[in-house]
Image (cartoon, rainbow, N blue to C red):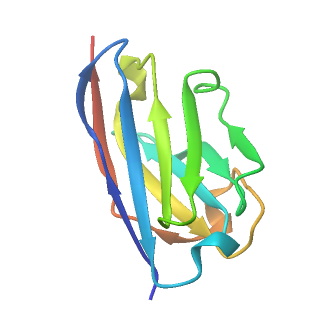
Amino acid sequence: QVQLVESGGGLVQAGGSLRLSCAASGRTFNDNAMGWFRQAPGKEREFVAAISSGGGSTTYADSVKGRFTISRDNAKNTVYLQMNSLKPEDTAVYYCARRRFGGVSHYSSAYLYWGQGTQVTVSS
């Protein structure tokens, strides 16, 4: 059974940084693309970033491009989201997700497994 466990969320001032981690278990990690999504109160879940199975391809939402970096360590079965220059509008619950396939996707429907989420709050 696949499990995804996020960590690293918290409260930070605008302009600060956080690094989220997502530890995966259950199936071969390095066959699957991984993604980060977020959901703010009263809003739909939205795509943040994704990385291919081997790490060679990444893609980002326009709203985070240049500020966030997704990476993965297949030896540790972990994917990361480094978030810099945080803004109050980045406040949300952040979820990591795992595809069945190796290529990246912006669509939440393309992801089969989801973590429980970690709260990120950016104060102004």
- Horizontally, is 119 left or right of 19 in the view? left
Q: Is residue 82 above or below residue 99?
A: above
Question: In the rendered picture of this protein, how many numbered marks are placed on residues?
Answer: 0
- Horizontally, is 5 left or right of 101 in the view? left
- Horizontally, is 1 left or right of 64 in the view? left
Q: Is residue 5 above or below residue 64?
A: below
Q: Residue furthest front?
A: 75
- Image quarter where the N terminus lies is bottom left
Of 57 and 91, which appears nearest the observer?
57
The residue that appears at 41% across and 20% down in the rendered structure is 86
The residue that appears at 72% across and 44% down in the rendered structure is 58
Q: Is residue 108 above or below residue 68?
A: below
Q: Position of residue 6 (x, y in %)?
A: 35, 57
Of 42 and 72, which appears nearest the observer?
72
Q: Position of residue 59 (x, y in %)?
A: 72, 41
Q: Position of residue 107 (x, y in %)?
A: 68, 55
Asked if one can make out residue 44 in the rendered structure from this viewpoint, the answer is no
Q: Residue furthest bottom?
A: 1
Q: Position of residue 124 (x, y in %)?
A: 27, 10
Residue 88 falls in image quadrant: top left
Asked if one can make out residue 6 in the rendered structure from this viewpoint, the answer is yes
- Horizontally, is 108 left or right of 89 in the view? right
Residue 119 falls in image quadrant: top left
Of 63 and 13, which appears nearest the observer?
13
